[in-house]
Image (cartoon, helix red, strand yellow):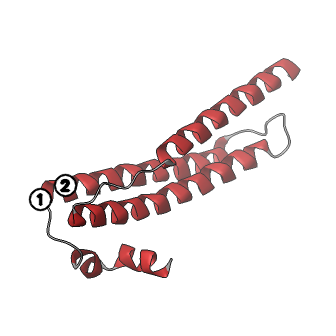
Amino acid sequence: MMQMIRNWFDPQELRSVGSTPDYRFSLANERTFLAWLRTGLALIAGGLAAAQFLPNLALVHLREAIAVALLLLGGVVAIRAVDHWARTERAIRLGEELPASRFPAVLALIVGLGALSLVVAVLAGAISG
């Protein structure tokens, strides 16, 4: 675990593995990392917006639950982004197959289920109000 985290912060360690790849592959990996980081920031911004701007909902503490869920999910996405970037860069340098990840599918399911839950909450509030 510590070696994995060390790889995130030590570019020399990462560059000491394998051979220097075509820079286009490293840049594409970096763009993917930045896209994941933007996704994490958007989730965090959504969590802050939910905490600040959503009115009290029909279900007690639903607003806070939404905010905390989005904030935590954003943090997980950001950490996952840097881990995936480092593992992919290492695989590129070693000429290995790129690491497979279930994370995009899991994230999509979480977001989809969250959206469905919010639809139910909004409809419940509309019917009771």
Residue type at mark 1: give it: Asp
Q: Furthest-front residue in view?
A: 96
Q: Nearer the viewer, residue 107 or 55?
A: 107
Question: Residue 125 shows which numbered tag?
Answer: none
Q: Where's residue 115, x and y in %?
A: 63, 32
Q: Are marks 2 and 1 in contact (CB under 8 Å)?
A: yes
Instruction: Give the residue number, with chain letter if any, for mark 1.
Output: 22
Q: Nearer the viewer, residue 115 or 99?
A: 99
Q: Could you classify mark 1 by the number of other residues whose Cα lies within 10 Å: few (under 14), some (14-19), or many (20 or more)?
A: few
Residue type at mark 2: give it: Phe
> Between marks 2 and 1, how big is the CA–CA gap?
6 Å
Q: Where's residue 128, x and y in %?
A: 88, 22
Instruction: Give the residue number, with chain letter if any, for mark 2.
Output: 25
| Badge 2 element | helix
- Residue appearing at x 50%, y 49% in the figure: 103
- Residue appearing at x 55%, y 58% in the figure: 76
Q: Where's residue 80, x and y in %?
A: 47, 59
Disc tally is 2
Q: Is residue 23 above or below residue 8?
A: above
- Residue appearing at x 47%, y 44% in the figure: 104
- Residue appearing at x 81%, y 46% in the figure: 61
Q: Is residue 45 above or below residue 90?
A: above
Q: Furthest-left residue in view?
A: 22
